[in-house]
Image: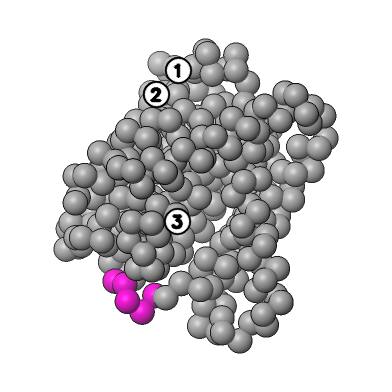
Amino acid sequence: MNAVVAALLPIFLLIVMGFLLRRYLIEEDAHWIGLERLLYYVMFPALLITTMARADLTKVPVLAVGATLFASVMLVSALCFALRPALSRWLGADGPAFAWLFQGATRWQTFVALPLAGNLYGDLGLALASVAIVAMTPVLNVLSVSVLVRSASRAKADWRSVLIAIARNPLIWACIVGAALNPVNALVPGPINAVIDALSRSSLALGLLIVGAGLRIDELARLKPLTLPTCAIKLVIMPAVAISIARSFGLSGTNLAVIVCCTAVPTASNSYVLARQLGGDAPLMAQIIMIETVIAAVTLPFALALVS
């Protein structure tokens, strides 16, 4: 419990700090827009590359863990699409709102999952979390970009524009580069590793500060109708699906616990940046990140207790 709270509290405080900085120190939008582009195109990719390139995958059941997480992503994504007509009819969810729900319900906060897995389960936990990055991050980025381009844009997008947006996504390329470097990481020159390390460490604080800068207190006080369904899918249904699939593969112990860490965490903070870059509802995305972070302080320890 203490390790979970210790991993979540800094996330929450950095979001609050970003809000205060935007309100009292750096008020111009142009500064934050520039930081968003730096984070999206440079710092987040550096984090993915260094984590995947250095993971020791020889001691973990890569296929079973990877298949569990991939299947969880696909099933929950299918659930979101299946619910879309009902959400549109009952809650007035238009295209941008659905794009917000999809990201909030499916993506995962690596900045919580990685340190949590490392604190609780050491090097084995980090290796398993790296498998999660390979299994979940590329497909989630492809799906998120597709949904944002197809749903968030007021103009009708064709599949050519979707494919172009996916091909230009730096997070997908970072996964490819990190996986390619994994077998030969020892040959990467020290200065290059040092630069990538510095960028990846900086991405944590900067990403959450940007999320905080995008918060609007009046929006937090008036929760949108889709907020609770989004939180329920992400923090309850997704880990429940993952646990069921993992047990069908015979996974238990640390393997199962890290799967829970990676599926029961809040949605990714770079969902906000992606929404800004591709036209999604960024203020609502900032709202859901904040709310899920608070709720996960309760639901994540409970999910871990179920598998311990």
Residue ID for mark 3: 114
Quarter in which the N terminus is drawn: top left
Q: Position of residue 279 (x, y in %)?
A: 67, 35
Magenta-drawn stretch, dominant element (helix, strand or loop):
loop
Tell me what residue is drawn at x 27 percent, y 62 percent. Answer: 255
Residue ID for mark 1: 225
Q: Is residue 35 above or below residue 247?
A: above
Q: Quadrant of residue 231?
A: top left
Q: Under tag 1, what secondary structure?
A: loop
Residue ID for mark 2: 228
Q: Nearer the viewer, residue 233 or 19?
A: 19
Tell me what residue is drawn at x 31 percent, y 72 percent. Answer: 60
Tell me what residue is drawn at x 51 percent, y 58 percent. Answer: 138
Mark 3 vs mark 2: which is more N-terminal?
3
Q: Is residue 263 above or below residue 222?
A: below
Q: Position of residue 44 (x, y in %)?
A: 62, 55
Asked whether residue 200 is drawn in magenta, I would say: no
Side of 60 where 81 appears, left or right: right
Q: Amino acid at mark 2?
A: Leu
Q: Under tag 2, what secondary structure?
A: helix
Front of the two marks 3 and 2 = 3
Q: Position of residue 86 (x, y in %)?
A: 38, 23
Q: Nearer the viewer, residue 147 or 187?
A: 187
Q: Is residue 297 above or below residue 194?
A: above
Tell me what residue is drawn at x 26 percent, y 42 percent. Answer: 303
Q: Amino acid at mark 3?
A: Leu
Q: Which mark is residue 54?
A: none
What stretch of residues is rendered in magenta?
57-61
